[in-house]
Amino acid sequence: MEADVFDPRALREALGAFPTAVTVITASDPADRPVGFTANSFTSVSLDPPLLLVCLAKTARDYSAMTAAEHFAINILSETQKDVSIKFARPLEDRFAAVDWARGPNGCPIFAWFECSMHDVIEAGDHAMMVGRVTAFESSGLNGLGYARGGYFAPSVAARANSSAAGGEIGAVAVLERHGALLGDENLSLPSYSAGGGDPAKTLASQLERLGLSVHDWFSLLDL
């Protein structure tokens, strides 16, 4: 089947099944004003030399400023920065009000960053591939924000879910209240335990009943 007969929406949905990281690409325009956009088309290309790649639609508002910049930055969003991704994906006038940012060594707006010099700009269909050579970087140490099938996910939460589904270890903690006060020892230690795979709510309820505590149908479990 030739590419020009593909249904664009079906193709987008098929490609969207691949989980990716979420980034915000930033640079400065000719007037030294910060510009940026959300992108998940990001990959590491090479370690020697250190090269990164991101794709930018030719219809993007800041396409000219981005592709003409001598330097740009790739900011890897953490699992707590979904709001930042959404704001940089929308046509807002002041996207940078959403984050605490600074200037990198080469002047790029940064907040969780790899700063790059422009290595190459390669036109590819309705996008351009911006290849950058890393000149400086800093790691936040936080888990990255993920994106797949049109929705965000936190890799650490997904890993816990997969571990439980595969029969991994489950940790549970109960917060108990009686007569308006928390139930626990003088150090405010809460009832907790580890168990194998299974339904966490049912397993915790069973454990509490063994301790002589009555668990009513209002019992609920929070994923902390």
Image: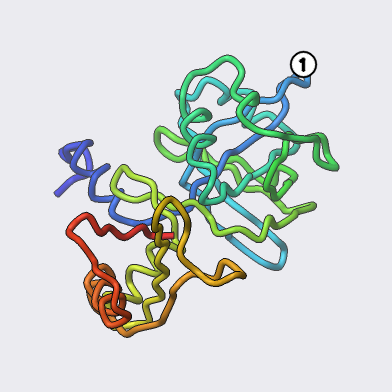
- Which residue matches tag 1? 31
**Residue 78, above or below 201:** above
Colour mapping: rainbow
Q: Is residue 18 left or right of residue 97?
A: left
At horizontal 23% and vertical 50% (from top left) the residue drawn is: 14
Q: Residue furthest right?
A: 105
Total numbered circles: 1
Image coords of residue 170 (percent x, y): 37, 77
Q: Amino acid at mark 1?
A: Ala
**Badge 1: how crowded within 10 Å, few (<14), some, or many (20+)?**
few
The extreme front residue here reads 179
Q: Quadrant of residue 218?
A: bottom left
Coordinates of residue 29 in the picture (x, y in percent) = 71, 22
Looking at the picture, how far across and down is residue 150, in whole percent?
31, 42
Quadrant containing the C terminus in the rendered view: bottom left
Residue 169 lies in quadrant: bottom left
**80 left or right, relative to 174:** right
Per the image, label 1 sits on a secondary structure element best described as loop
**Above-or-below relation of 89 to 156:** above
Which residue is located at x 44 percent, y 55 percent? Answer: 154
Q: Position of residue 48 (x, y in %)?
A: 71, 68
**Residue at (78% x, 21% y) in the render:** 32
